[in-house]
Each structure stands twice: as C-alpha cells, then as structure tokens.
Image (cartoon, rainbow, N blue to C red):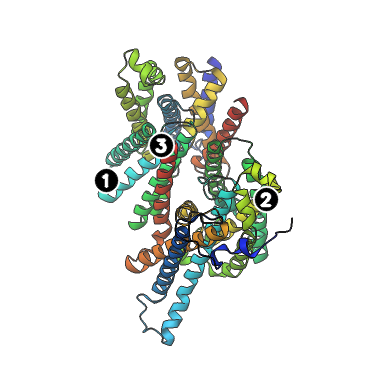
Amino acid sequence: MPETRTAATDAPQVSGHTPGPGERRTGPFVRGRDRLRYALVMALLVLLALGFTAGILAYDNPMPVGTDGFWRIAELRATSIAVILVVAFCHAFATVSFQTATSNRIITPSIMGFEALYVVVQTGAVFFLGASGVAAVTGTAQFLLQAGLMVVVATILYGWLLSGRFGSIHIMLLVGVILGGGLGSLSTFMQRLLTPSEFDILTARLFGNIGNADAAYLPYAVPIALAAGGALWWRARRLDVLALGRDATTNLGLNHRREVIVVLVLVSVLMAMTTSLVGPMTFLGFLVAMLAYQFADTYDHRLLLPMAFLLGYVVLSGAYFVLRHVFYAQGMVTIIIELVGGLTFLVYIIRKGRL
Amino acid sequence: MPLAVVLTAGLLALSLSVGVYDITDGEDGWAMFGITRVPRTISLVLAGAAMSMCGLVMQLLTQNRFVEPTTTGTTEWAGLGLLLVFILVPGASLLTKMAGAVVMAFIGTMVFFAFLRRVSLKSSLIVPIVGIMIGAVVGAVSTYLALATDMLQQMGIWFAGSFTSVVRGRYEMLWIVLVVTLLVFLLADRLTVAGLGKDVATNVGLDYDRVILLGVAMVAVATGVVTVVIGSLPFLGLIVPNVVSLLRGDNLRSNLPWVCLLGVWVVTVCDIIGRTIIMPFEVPVSLILGVLGAVFFIALLVIRQRRA
C-alpha cells in the first residue's frame, strides 16, 4: 500500500488559502479560527519550552551569563534537558498512538502496565542469567536485547489483550491495571531473591529520576526513540485512519490487525526507552494526551503528536525548573506529575462514568 | 468440615516448625519458639481471617465482586494515616499509630463510597478501576510526604506486608481484628440484606446507612490494624471470598467459616513459601500474594467474560 501524498493533504496548515471566519472547509480544522488557535497554542508552548529550558540552564548559575564557567555548568544541566526531551517525546508519541490504535482515550501504555513489563523483563534477565549474566547485563548489546525482548512480549501480550477478545474497554483496563500491579510484585519478588551485588546493579538501572538518570543510556535511547517516533510520524496518516475504528479502517483498505500490531511494537519500543531512563511514570502520558486533544481539537496526528510532545516537555521541564531551582526538591518532579495526572484521570473517569 | 479443621491444624503445625533457629536446641530453642514462632502463627491466623472477611464485607456492601481493601485504596489510606502520625507525633506509641491508620482508612473508604454514589454505574468494572486510581493518587501523596520528611525507606519497610517483625510484644494489637471477625459473624444477616441494595434493605426495615457505616468502620479497623502491624496483604480479600463462592455458591451464613479458614490457609501457605524459598532470608508475603492475586484476578475476569 504505497502512500499517496498530494500537496493539499500533506501540509494543509501551510497552504496559501486562508478561509474567512465561519467558512466551512475540509481538512484538519473545520474553521479558520481553530487553525489560528492551534498556531497560537503551539507558539505559546514553544515560548514556554524555551523559557523553561533557559531557566534550567541559567537560573541560579553562579557564573555570569556567557562566560566559560557558565557554559560548563550549563553543559552539565543540559543532560537533564536531554532526558526530559526523550521522556516527553516517548510518552507523548506512545500514548497518543496507543490511544488511537485501541480507539479509546482512557487507557495508556503506562496504565496498561507496559513499564511494569519492562521492569520484569530486566529483572528476569538478571534473575535467570544469574551472577555470570550480571556483567553481561550492563553491556549495551544486552540492553538492546532486553528492550527487544520487551517488545516481543508486549506485542504478544497486549496484542492478545487488545484484539477485542474482551469486548469491553473496562475489562481491558482492569486486566491491564491488575497485570501491571502483578508484574510489579513479580519483579520485586525476583529482586528479593537476587544477591546483593546483582540487586545493586539492577536498582541502579531501574530506579532513577530526571535528576540522576544515567546519561550513558542517552546515546542509545535517543536514536532508538527517534527511530520509533519517526516511524509513527511517517505512519501518521494511517493513524488518522485507524482512529475511525476497525470497520472503517478495513473498508478503507488497511489491514486493521496488522496496523494495530505495528503501532503496539513502536509504542513498546518508546516505553522501553523512557523507562530505562527515568523509570515508570504512570499518568504523564494520560495528562499530556488529554491536554493535546483539548487544545488541538483535531483528528490529524501530524498536528496532535507535536503538540503532545511540546506539552509533555513544558509540563516536565516546568515542574523540574520550579521544583529544583525554586523549592530545591528535584526528587519530587515525577511524584507531583503523578499526583496531578492521577487526579485528572479520576475526574475524567468520574465524568465519563456519568455518561 | 472435620477435614478442613485437620488441614488447618496441619498447616499451622507446619508453620510453627518452619524457621532458621533450631528450636529443638534445649531451653533456648523453646524460648525462641514462644517469642517468635507462636506469635507469628497467631498473627497469620488473625490477619488472614480478618482481611478475607473485610473483602467479603466490602463486596457485599458495594454489590461488586472485584472490591476489597487493595482495590478501593483503603490500604493506601491507612498507610497515609500511619505516615501522618509518624510526621506529626514523632515517637508515637503503637496505639497512636494505629488510631491514625484506622481513622484515615475510614475516611478513605467513605470517600470511595461517596465516589460510588456519584458515578452512575453502567459497568461494575469501573468500580475497581476508580478505587485503584484513588489508591495510586493517595500513594503518590504518601510518597511525596515521605520524601519531604526523609521517611521513604521507613515507609517502604512498614508497607511491605510481612510477618518478619512479628514477635512477642509487637503483635498483640492484632487481637483487635478478632473482634471485627466476630462482628461479621454477628452481623452477617444484616450485611446480606444491605447487599441487596438500598431500596430492598429499607423496605424490610433495615437502617441502610447505619449498616453501611458499621461495615465501613469494621473494614477500616481491620485494615488499619493489619497495615500497622503487618503491612499490606494485596488481593487476599479478593481471592478468598471469590474462591469460596465459586466452590460453594452464595449462601453467606454457611460460607463465613470457609472464608475465614481459606483466608488462613492462603496466608499461611504464602508465608511458608516466603520463609523457605531463600532460607535463611525471607520474601515478604505481600509479594507472593501480589503475584498469585493478580493471576487469580485475571483468571476470574476471563472466566466471567466467557460465561457472560
């Protein structure tokens, strides 16, 4: 199925024609006003993102701006920014695509236990390879191997779970949540059986936060995340079709099952990358995706994905900046986001429960 | 029933005989036996029976098979209460800690019930989802507080359900849950009627709200006490009543003793596994329960879905 592209469908928002107010048109935005709003929100987000980035780099930097010493300190802090970029990118792309592929806006990869699965795979590798495997696990080839294993397991498990066998979203969500909890217990269980030295190596890998994420993984996480995200971007048009549901997708000539599985594979790659960097974050993706739907108000994934990414970056870097440099409490970034995201999730579900 | 009693006795004897310290080693050994083994086995019985009963009571009151202290966030609220006492009253007595845990567990369970009344329940499955999410949010609050006050590690130890720290002088509070268990036996009929729904219950002359309040209070007391002494025992209240009703149907009165016994069996077996698998160290019983519980829960969902 070669993708046919024309200038009109490829980048509607930069085409020359500007419809007047109230004029109806086809395309990602119904009215010109919506497009303007999208552009404004994006501009605001870019400004905020730049502001927070500058803030993280420069705030409370003891050296005067522009000197050698300033840049040296800024360089150290740039690692945090790179980590935030990767995490926001992975969560935003993974959640939006996942919600489209499963055609509902409640479940997210994190809530369905993708991260817990990654932790189990990691722990299981150390557990079953034993003492001799410990050295191997720290190597990069093994890191990739484990990520690959996680992708395979996630595809089989969630492909089965999400293939409509269970019929109802609620039961799927419940199974996912419980599965996540059970997998969490399973990995803690295996960790208890490890020898202390094995355990140390594992803990160092699994529990981090933005402040002390292991920069050594960045050279692998960034290109892999970019590749997976790029693949999703490239297939964004198919995601638009998938969003119409199984029947419409099949009618339009796409193999629904195949498309969903491809998306699941890419999502699990993204989740593996972010988890390896900062550990599990349950509600970030939900928060970001929901905000993106509200602000963008369009079906077009080429417009949704970047906005979700920017939102994620602004939320994370903003929280990080405020907590680290104003309140000196950098360890709390993820917890606060969990809190806000979790509350949003509850409010959303309560409102949905009334529908 | 006689067979069940024999089985229980056997399991308890096995539980008493498991351990690293050689109890046959003269007087010293028997002193150890009295200090750690006996309290441990007693607390296994008490906690197992009480938490299974809690699950049963909550399932009756919410008319939902998937509800129990783990899936309603009650355990997390109890943990939050415990933490608050730690922060506000440093060096508090065990009784104060317990009071904090029980009060917060009560508040939390009432919050959950308030949530349930506001949501029009199109699907019974949304109830546990909401509960688990409330639990996650409350858990995030606890983690935040613990981090801010440097208590994270302490909280982790308190929270992982384990019978390791049960020795003479540290477990006696657990006898409180025996009262709860007995109360459930006494109130069984009223709870059953309340389980038929507010309209039916009111029609047959039951003060529905009072029974709900009483039920929630009992669950809160048991959960609070068990959380303070043992930690969380995930899914226990879910596995046990469901297995009993799968095997025996839904006659509450005749099921009650079985729920108690099965609860004791499950906890004892999990505890024995935890104690022997990496001897001379231990795996917290909560982890084994967490894994088994998750598997059971999903199996239950799949079975029910097949039948539907």
**Quadrant of residue B119 within the rendered picture:** top left
Kind of residue indicated by mark 3? Ile
Horizontal side of residue A209 vs A154, given as left or right: left
In the rendered structure, the residue with mark 1 lies on which chain?
A: B
Q: Position of residue B80 (x, y in %)?
A: 35, 45
Kind of residue indicated by mark 1? Ala
Q: Position of residue B165 (x, y in %)?
A: 42, 42
Residue marked by disc 3: B35
In the rendered structure, the residue with mark 2 lies on which chain?
A: A
Q: Position of residue A299 (x, y in %)?
A: 54, 53
Residue marked by disc 2: A259
Number of numbered discs: 3
Residue found at the very far top of the displayed protein: B204
Residue found at the very far bottom of the displayed protein: A67
Please rate how many residues cluster around mark 2, counting C-alpha atoms within 10 Å: few if below 14, some from 14 to 19, many from 20.
some
Mark 1 vs mark 2: in front: 2
Please rate how many residues cluster around mark 1, counting C-alpha atoms within 10 Å: few if below 14, some from 14 to 19, many from 20.
few
Distance from disc 1 to disc 3, alpha carbons, whole Å, reads 24 Å
Q: Quadrant of the N terminus of chain A?
A: bottom right
In the rendered structure, the residue with mark 3 lies on which chain?
A: B
Q: Position of residue A314 (x, y in %)?
A: 43, 64
Kind of residue indicated by mark 2? Glu
Disc 3 on helix, strand or loop?
Answer: helix
Disc 2 on helix, strand or loop?
Answer: helix
Labels 2 & 3 near each other (Cβ < 8 A) = no
Q: Residue at x 62, y 41 (%)?
A: A161
Viewer-closest of A109 and B84: A109
A212 is higher (above) or lower (below) than B70:
below
A20 is higher (above) or lower (below) than B251:
below
Distance from disc 2 to disc 3, alpha carbons, whole Å, reads 62 Å
Residue marked by disc 1: B92
